[in-house]
Image: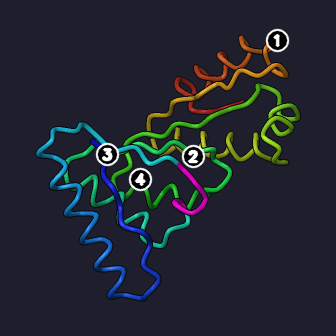
């Protein structure tokens, strides 16, 4: 059972209050169906929602385990800190390669690997569990072992090389 959030309301405080109340009510109601958690899959629109932190808080306060799946390129340290304060429990980041130049090329986003590394390091600092999703691609298949080796460096050392 998925929880359907209402579309973003573009009015000021009254719309904000209505949306958060509706999301909180949906999460509370969803608990009766016995879900264990809620996963937010990042899109730029979702991360940039003015109420995303409050939606995360509503899910957390309803007793749901909160998970964010993100490319890590559309989120900064300040935003992740606010999400963690709101109750974010876990993050998943996809990496495209163990080498920055190739990862950026595959992602078609200059600097993507550096942004992913920065978010991974911030999450380690905040002691938030992190899953790395290693995307296997014909351009990186020879470096699968190197990509897998990134996981322990994040999980156990708290730093992504």
Say few, some or many: other residues with alpha carbon within 10 Å of mark 2 (under 14 / 14 to 19 / 20 or more): some
Q: Which mark is residue 1?
A: none
Is residue 63 inside the magenta stretch?
A: no
Circle on res. 122: 2
**Is label 1 in a helix, a strand or a loop?**
helix
Q: Which range is magenta?
A: 42-47
Instruction: Name which of mark 1 and mark 3 comes first in the sequence.
Output: 3
Circle on res. 2: 3
Question: What residue is drawn where x is 51% and y is 30%?
Answer: 131
**Residue that mark 1 sits on:** 142
Cβ atoms under marks 3 and 4 closer than 8 Å: no
Q: To which residue does mark 4 refer?
A: 84
Q: Tell me how far mark 3 sits from mark 4, CA to CA.
A: 22 Å
Cα distance in 3D space between marks 2 and 1 = 29 Å
Instruction: Tell whether 118 sits left or right of 58.
Output: right
Q: What residue do we see at 67% from left, 42% from top?
A: 116
Instruction: Report the residue at 58% width, 37% height from top.
Output: 93
Q: CA distance from mark 2 to mark 4?
A: 11 Å
Mark nearer the N terminus (1 vs 4):
4
Sequence-first tag of 2 and 1: 2
């Amino acid at each position: 059972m998925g929880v359907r959030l209402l579309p973003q309301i573009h009015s000021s405080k009254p719309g904000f209050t209505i949306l958060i109340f509706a999301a909180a009510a949906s999460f509370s109601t969803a608990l009766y169906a016995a879900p264990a958690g809620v996963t937010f899959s990042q899109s730029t629109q979702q991360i940039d929602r003015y109420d995303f932190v409050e939606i995360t808080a509503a899910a957390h306060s309803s007793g749901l385990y909160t998970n964010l799946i993100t490319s890590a390129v559309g989120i900064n340290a300040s935003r992740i800190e606010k999400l963690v304060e709101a109750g974010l429990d876990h993050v998943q980041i996809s990496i495209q390669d163990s080498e920055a130049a190739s990862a950026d090329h595959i992602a078609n986003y200059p600097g993507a690997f550096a942004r992913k590394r920065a978010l991974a390091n911030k999450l380690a600092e905040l002691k938030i569990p992190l899953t790395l999703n290693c995307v296997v691609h014909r351009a990186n298949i020879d470096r699968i072992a190197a990509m897998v080796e990134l996981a322990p460096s994040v999980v156990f050392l708290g730093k992504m090389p």
